[in-house]
Amino acid sequence: MKRIIYILTVALLPIVAQGQVTFSHPGGFYTDTFSLSMTMAEPTCTIHYTLNGCVPTADDPQYTEPLPMSTELYSRSELYRIVASPRHIWHSPDSVEHAIVVRAALFDSQGQRCSKVTTATYFIDTLLGRHISLPVVSLCVDSAALFDHDTGIYVPGALYDSLNWEITGNYCQHGREWERWASFTFYNHDSTSISQTCGLRIRGASQRLKRQKSFSLYSRAEYGAKKFNYHFFVNRSQTSYKRLALRGWDATYGWDDTGVNDWLCQKIADSLLCDNLASRPVALFINGEYWGIYFLSEKADEHYIEEHHGVDHDDVDLLSWWDGTVESGSADRWQSLWEWFADADLTTDDNYRYLADKIDMDAIIDYIIAEVFVSNVDWPGNNLRFWSTPETKWRWIFYDADAALSLYRPNSEILGYLTCDDSTMTYPSSPYATLLFRQLLSNAEFRNKAIERFHHLASTAFAYERTRSLLDTIIDLVEAEVPHQQARFDNGITLEIWRTRIDYIYNYLEQKAISMPTDFADHVGINSTEQPFTRIFPNPTKGQAMLYLGTATGDITIGIYDIYGHTAGTINSNGQSCLVLPTLPRGVYLIHVGNTSIPLRWVVL
């Protein structure tokens, strides 16, 4: 037998322990079967255990001899058959894959539990018929907490109304009352993992209705740990998280069904000045039953802001819509600011400077550009998170891009959403949702800064070489798991169809890096009385590139320099506003137009 990785998982329950059960084999990934032994340090106690993910009681089987690890130990609960969505969208697979979940505790002669619960989940290749290459999250929850008609948080249940099926059901409820205890274990494919008891809630909007729902995870002292202390995300320095999210793969169902959109967009946004959320793909098992591909992610709340910005979460005002809908804190400061800029003339320098003291302009420029570049068509009338404290400026979090990256949507659509002033429109954009953007874009300094920034990002963060590499990465991680996701939640998207739609994303990234910055500049407009805005198209380029000088007239000298400052070429405009740049070897060049102090960056591939 070859042991790949292992970890012992201990469910931290609010009970004074008298020792606890020890397993001979910690939970984790194994290639072959074995026999599991249980031992204890309290000879006056007995061991009782469960195989269905529930907390053991004295009425459950007593341990007397090693358990041969076989399919006989799979849970027989068949949770996957329980109707968990409105009937017209419900579908149950014929079967699901299983891991073996063992939960055990000590009981005294009176049948009272006198130890913490030891929990382990075993993923055995020979039983599964495959090796799971993704990290795994195992949730163990008393079945009634999820599926009871009255109190279960995963089902339509007692609160479901078929006449209002989109907004009713147990799974549509919010708040602490609808939080349930769960044993959470993250099994990584190395020697480090984490396990603890936490709070579990259903999260999201329309995804609450779907078969594959998303979850929020809450660490609390009453569960045994105030934080999730683990380095979950390689692109983050944080090793401690108050809350986490499990975002279901099917969140993109109805958009393009690729599953990877938000992950990819968040990775693209990593290098931007706005806030964004780290995530990683995992396979989820609930009480030993396979629940498909999820993304373990940061949760966009006041604790995220505290963790990233060093502010006290109690000081954070976190809002989720333009009218001041409060997620945390208060909307008073935002509503006061909104009332002011709704009628302010931002073409004047004094008014713009006043607003710049309240809003992080560099951050909101990157936020706007990111949403536009990925064509998030479920925005700006939805999917908002923005925040500040009394001592900090307002900032936006790049949040939920499941509806992004569709090749078939023209640039004009998302640009129209950005500046919508059609009073008959309420979703996905509206004059109310675009008021701030339209006001900001009326200011020449802001507008030109945004245009220049977009062109810069087109050759850096949005450059196809970078975004293609990011998409390659996620494909390498999840492709082997996609057929199993499809078998679990059949939505008609075969592996072949999925690969075709992934190809669309590749095409999108290549095309939009070239076309979107220029279309953005054209859409927001250049006032002819302002200083001409220069840009290179396409950039980067593998062939001929053009230099646009806007409204420039007269004879302007354009100098081209390599990164060492050596002259690579010189051309004259001769009164023309569109010039062909010379063919140059691969490299990065700086282009100075006349005596401008800010050069353009040109990448030749």
Image: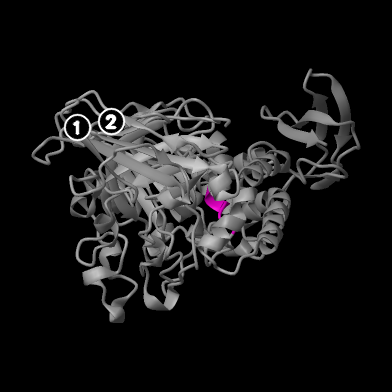
Disc 1: which residue = 115
Closer to us: 135 or 591? 135
Residue in the image at 57% along x and 56% along y: 484
Residue 595 visible here: yes
Residues rendered magenta in the picture: 258-262
Q: Residue 118 vs residue 444: left or right?
A: left
Q: Residue 542 vs residue 125: left or right?
A: right
- Looking at this rendering, what residue extends furthest in the left direction? 110
Q: Amino acid at mark 1?
A: Ser
Q: How is the image coloured?
A: one colour
Quadrant of the image occupied by residue 113: top left
Q: Residue 460 vs residue 53: left or right?
A: right
Where's the C terminus, which quadrant?
Answer: top right
Expressed as whole percent of the image width and height from the top left, the position of residue 130 reads 60, 47
Disc 2: which residue = 21
Residue in the image at 54% along x and 66% along y: 490
Closer to us: 471 or 447? 471
Examine the structure image and report whether residue 259 is included in the region drawn in magenta.
yes
Q: Which secondary structure class fits the magenta region best?
A: loop
Residue 548, numbered circle = none
Residue in the image at 71% along x and 30% along y: 599
Q: Residue 131 vs residue 314: left or right?
A: right
Examine the structure image and report whether residue 341 is included in the region drawn in magenta.
no
Expressed as whole percent of the image width and height from the top left, the position of residue 79 reads 37, 61
Expressed as whole percent of the image width and height from the top left, the position of residue 235 reads 52, 30
In the image, residue 499 sits, relative to residue 354, either above or below, namely: below
